[in-house]
Image (spheres, grey):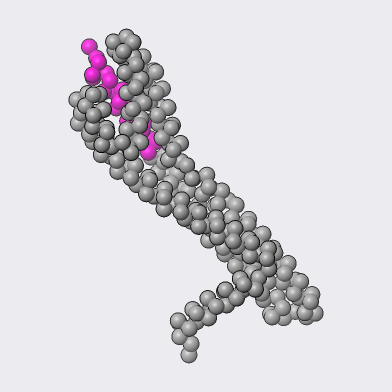
Amino acid sequence: MTSPLAALLSLQTGFWELISGGSILTNVVLVILVGFSVYSWTLIFAKLSVLGAARKTDERFLRAFRKSNGLESVMVASEQFRPSPLVSVFDAGYEEVSRQVKAKGSPSNQAAINRSLQIGTNQQLGRLEKGLGWLATTASVCPFIGLLGTVLGIIRAFQSLKGAGSASLDSVGPGIAEALIATAAGLFAAIPAAMAYNHFNQQLKAMGSDMDDFGLEFLNLIERSFGD
């Protein structure tokens, strides 16, 4: 009776034999898919780290913001939360408030402050969204690249069948196996990328909503600080 370890080693050996014995075009397709997959996983881990750190610093800054007595105290406290996207949104609003105070003595144009906060929000979301386009491209394109490898494998199977003169597993097996490997590689690259894209997109929507809410809290702080 064959042991599970021996069966696994036999499967791995057969897998590498198929790849090494495959056609050049099919192997090029596999290399492309592996490249897509490796780069996508690199982006996924990097984005997990960036978004995780951003949410943690956002929460800490928001607690400090809500405990503050005015803009100046928030500005001082914000230095220790500088990676936070909310700090950048605060900076955008604070700069507009400072300009209005210098010009007129008080922040009289709330619409301009609100626009500055929105610009800061858009800039931060744009920064955090970097890389998501690649994940979306991987999710949509890789299945078709895998399909191309499948077609090439089937073509090779028919060519082998023509050369053999009779239908047999030995003649069509390698080409069919290449086709299945290309299909699996395309799905292996596309499925994680699609799942990660949807996950990060939901996170960014939540963060965007948090930034919008923070903008309202910022305006409330302005009214309390400069109100009559």
- In this view, the residue farthest toward the bottom is 1
Q: Picture quarter containing residue 167? A: bottom right
Quadrant position of the C terminus in the picture = top left
Q: Position of residue 37 (x, y in %)?
A: 52, 57
Q: Picture quarter containing residue 74? A: top left
Per the picture, the main secondary structure of the magenta-coloured stretch is helix
Query: In this rendering, is residue 189 above or below 161?
Result: above
Q: Which residue is at a point 76% across and 71% down the rendered structure image?
A: 159
- In this view, the residue farthest toward the top is 104
Q: Position of residue 104 (x, y in %)?
A: 32, 9
In the picture, measured across the screen, residue 15 lies left or right of residue 176, that is left
Q: Picture quarter containing residue 14? A: bottom right
Residue 157 sits inside the magenta stretch: no
Residue 218 sits inside the magenta stretch: yes
Residue interval drawn in magenta: 207-228
Q: Position of residue 208 (x, y in %)?
A: 39, 36
In the picture, measured across the screen, residue 116 lies left or right of residue 32, that is left
Q: Which residue is nearer to you in this view: 32 or 51?
A: 32
Q: Position of residue 12 (x, y in %)?
A: 53, 76
| Number of on-image labels | 0
Query: In this rendering, is residue 182 above or below 119?
Result: below
In the picture, measured across the screen, residue 177 lies left or right of residue 107, that is right
Q: Which residue is at a point 69% across and 80% down the rendered structure image?
A: 170
Q: Which residue is at a point 23% across and 24% down the rendered structure image?
A: 72
Q: Which residue is at a point 42% across and 27% down the rendered structure image?
A: 119
Can residue 187 be seen here? The reply is: no
Can residue 72 be seen here? The reply is: yes
Query: In this rendering, is residue 90 above or below 80?
Result: above
